Amino acid sequence: MSEVQQVSRRRGGRQARQALRAAPKTEDARPVRAGLDGGSFKPLKESDIFRIHEAALTVLETVGMADAPPSCIDYITKAGGILADNGRLLFPRALVEDTLAKAARKFVLHGQSPEHDLEPWGSKVHFGTAGAAVSIVDPFTKQYRHSNIQDLYDLSRLADRMDNIHFFQRMVVPRDLPEPADMDFNTCYASVSGTTKHVGSSWVNPKHLEKSLEMLHYIAGGEGKWRARPFVSQSNCFVVPPLKFTEDACACLEVAVRGGMPVLLLSAGQAGATSPAALAGCIVQEVAEVLAGLVYVNAIKPGHPAIFGTWPFVSDLRTGAMSGGSGEQALLSAACGQMAQFYDLTGGAPAGMTDSKLPDAQGGYEKGYNHALAANSGLNMIYESAGMHASLLGACFESLVIDNDSIGAVLRTVRGIEISEDSLSVEAIRQVCTQGPGHFLGHDQTLSLMETEYVYPQVGDRTSPKEWVEQGETDAVEKAHKKVREVLSTHYPRHISDKMDEEIRARFDIKIDRADMTAGNGRWERSA
Amino acid sequence: MSEVQQVSRRRGGRQARQALRAAPKTEDARPVRAGLDGGSFKPLKESDIFRIHEAALTVLETVGMADAPPSCIDYITKAGGILADNGRLLFPRALVEDTLAKAARKFVLHGQSPEHDLEPWGSKVHFGTAGAAVSIVDPFTKQYRHSNIQDLYDLSRLADRMDNIHFFQRMVVPRDLPEPADMDFNTCYASVSGTTKHVGSSWVNPKHLEKSLEMLHYIAGGEGKWRARPFVSQSNCFVVPPLKFTEDACACLEVAVRGGMPVLLLSAGQAGATSPAALAGCIVQEVAEVLAGLVYVNAIKPGHPAIFGTWPFVSDLRTGAMSGGSGEQALLSAACGQMAQFYDLTGGAPAGMTDSKLPDAQGGYEKGYNHALAANSGLNMIYESAGMHASLLGACFESLVIDNDSIGAVLRTVRGIEISEDSLSVEAIRQVCTQGPGHFLGHDQTLSLMETEYVYPQVGDRTSPKEWVEQGETDAVEKAHKKVREVLSTHYPRHISDKMDEEIRARFDIKIDRADMTAGNGRWERSA
């Protein structure tokens, strides 16, 4: 190639690059997106998975569950369960196997906008939030202050704008609403008002859930439309590990199932405290407990959408405190991803928590390896993946933005390496080395891949030290804070129109002012 | 169990716990250590690996390498290589296959202390440093200052005390030594003086290497003892990608091979710049280049220890700048781990770099997912894994300590989940649920596993927000800095005795004062 050709080619390259970057990208052309196929990380061998399954069946058949409330006993004994003399409810192997045969598979988790519908099955990976933090972390002042309903709404609309956060489960407890009825109802309201992504929420009393369902019917345009596209799922702790049902949650579960609301069957044993310290045993107990929940759901209504929510946590055995950022946690969550795939059920587990109180280096690396291993296991629904600190005690706006970048990079690793005649690049190498300029910078292949194969962080910094100094030496928290303010001072979603909101307020006791859900209220506009 | 029994059991538990923690742990009883078996993360399928291998052979056979110096041409054409009319050296498939048949396998990388000997083969994982940073990062002032020979020595002895850093390859360029001869020699001297772990270093001129070998013979106690246990390997960039030999490095390579020094055959193509933007093609070129190096080494001396150093880097294609912290980087390094296992060669690649200029949240998460995926691929030698910033332009003392914790947790994930009758815990679950206290805190299994199965960070913080406030709200950098000062004010290794050092100084031009290598010099004692 002559020098003139090279120059012209390079200029063509620049033009092509500009054109590419100017064109709006469709979801499919993005380098990463919801539902990429994982499964390249397999901490458990196939024989291990089978042994865990067998052990879980033995536990269910011989140890069973304590404290089942009457309606639960009724449903499960009618299905084939046995109430033992010691009061424990036993699950014969055949009952569990029958349940697995009829359990719901390949159900969509809907968004209020269809563009956010999720198909969480196989080894397809989705990241989202979750948690019941009681504090908001201010990384500048290092203060933990009580979280409130406005925070929850703000977190919801911030998550709405984070490309790699695919669903929003409520992150904080609104401590300004001490009445459980207000808290449950307004948690749901604030979440569905802030985002059109699929929402997860939680209720402590079935009456609160019934009222929330009324509101959701209204937002959906009627009960039929809600049931066709339920866009809220219930995060339900039906079990207090080890192996005990909990009455209120069981009551809420029954209402959710009858009300057409998908349920996340959440068992949150903490290894070394409420589940065995041996990681294998911790998984056995998780699987047994969630299978018990699955039997219950399917006894109420066969085929009702239920997420296999094995949520193992880890203890620091020196103190008994939870350690959500540990390597042990990453292993457990990834292994749970494999167990759900074994059952061909939609699996959910936590990954991306940290024990650090701040979005510092520790917060970063703990989230990084947990994201990477859980996602590459092919876990379908990765909860608690963004914004959480102090093993779920604190939520942080800036972290939600920072974690969105970590997740984007990890999703790129889930996507993997494409192998084809073209991508193997023998011809490109030959051209560059024997005819071309000796580098690949302006090569057609490079230009064609730059927007579709490479992920660029939203706030992550890739400048040189020199440029970085010129730009003010900002760290990750400072850059994220700028993004938080940019989004939260402008993005006030109106998928629930002012008119509809007015009618909701007329029927229900909404604890957040509409003015605080409207641009120009001054909350996020003031300078840092 | 009666309440009295429970209490007594709990007390027994505390005593057992104290006894366990007081006893010194042997290396085998540590929850993580050098050489754990990876291989659970497989971004490439077997057929992918074979296609990459085939493509690399085609590249070597038909495109070959440019700019081979005369002695290299001589060695390789005698072995069966062909010098083409265009001056490129071609490697017929049979030559590569013959080389692979006779290449060194299962060679130990020695430490000066045998306790640090590494056995980097199969899918056994080792973490270490590397890099040629030109700056030291001060995370408190956000300054990048020129690195010097004292920094290198200090980094070496800090790494000596970091349990999860298994080898030390020089991290910084001593910019206070502008003469290449001084730089090469003193880099080697400072590194071997600071640590008894295996050292990697680099030379720009064969004469500098010869002089360094003299010193190494002396430290070892004679050339014979050096050759029996060579404790320094040469990091050698024999190739300037794409596919060009570089003369000085080739000369150094030949001296190393003849001198019994293991070589790291390092090809550092940067995807989208000096290697193809398609990740698969980037790996093809890496593999082809390192195979060319392997042919060269084995043509000089069959079976000489050589590390398969496919070091792919990534470009940010918007700017052409290197992005060592990206998700693409994690994929490439992990895939290279798989390629080395395919050839049954000792593989080395980088993981744990970051584009962040500081040990902040970005620095953390980029390191976290890169550590996790490279290690779980079973990559034998993970370079650049600690202390590096700004895509290798800066090295940071505090980061070395922070990264040691990240690596410890990741090594726990490499160790995986033990599956056995005991670990599956059916009996433990039965006891706790039907006879015991309803929790696992004081259970025998928990006590027996707390020191052998769970990794505790050295500086990572797991306190509650309340305790954290009481303890002064320290972040990761502040805690790490304390550790840095604690180690560097006290740990002045004397495996090279004062007497031997004096004799070395009499024979060679050492550019670092012995006083600065001796406790009480005031460098690290002064308050922060």
Image (cartoon, coloured by chain):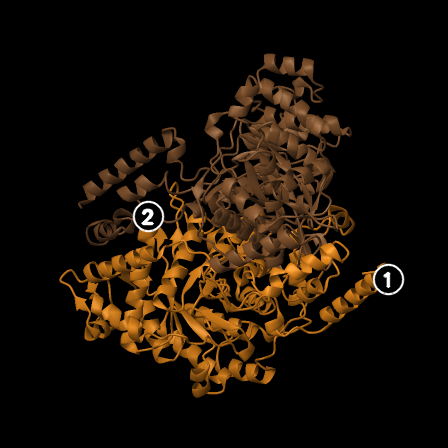
Chain colours: A brown, B orange
**Viewer-proximal residue among A152 and B332:** A152
- Label 1 sits on what residue type? Val
> Residues at marks 2 and 1, common chain?
yes
Q: Are marks 2 and 1 in contact (CB under 8 Å)?
A: no
Residue at point 67%, 29% (across, down): A187
Q: Nearer the viewer, mark 2 or mark 1?
A: 1
Residue to which mark 2 is pinned: B278
Mark positioned earlier in the residue sequence (2 or 1): 1
- Which residue sits furthest right? B4
In the image, is A286 to the left or to the right of B76?
right
Residue at point 69%, 19% (across, down): A513
For the C terminus of chain A, give its image quadrant.
top right
The percent coordinates of residue B253 (x first, y second) are 34, 72
In the image, is A377 to the left or to the right of A392?
left
- Mark 2, Cα crowd under 10 Å, few <14 / some 14-19 / many 20+, is many
Residue to which mark 1 is pinned: B4
Q: CA distance from mark 2 to mark 1?
A: 67 Å
The percent coordinates of residue A217 (x first, y second) are 59, 20
- Mark 1, Cα crowd under 10 Å, few <14 / some 14-19 / many 20+, is few
Chain of the residue under label 1? B
Provide the secondary structure element on which disc 1 rests.
Answer: helix
Tell me, yes or no, if residue B511 can be seen here: no
Kindly indicate the quadrant of the structure image that contains residue A194. top right
The percent coordinates of residue B32 (x first, y second) are 58, 66
- Label 2 sits on what residue type? Ala
Provide the secondary structure element on which disc 2 rests.
Answer: loop
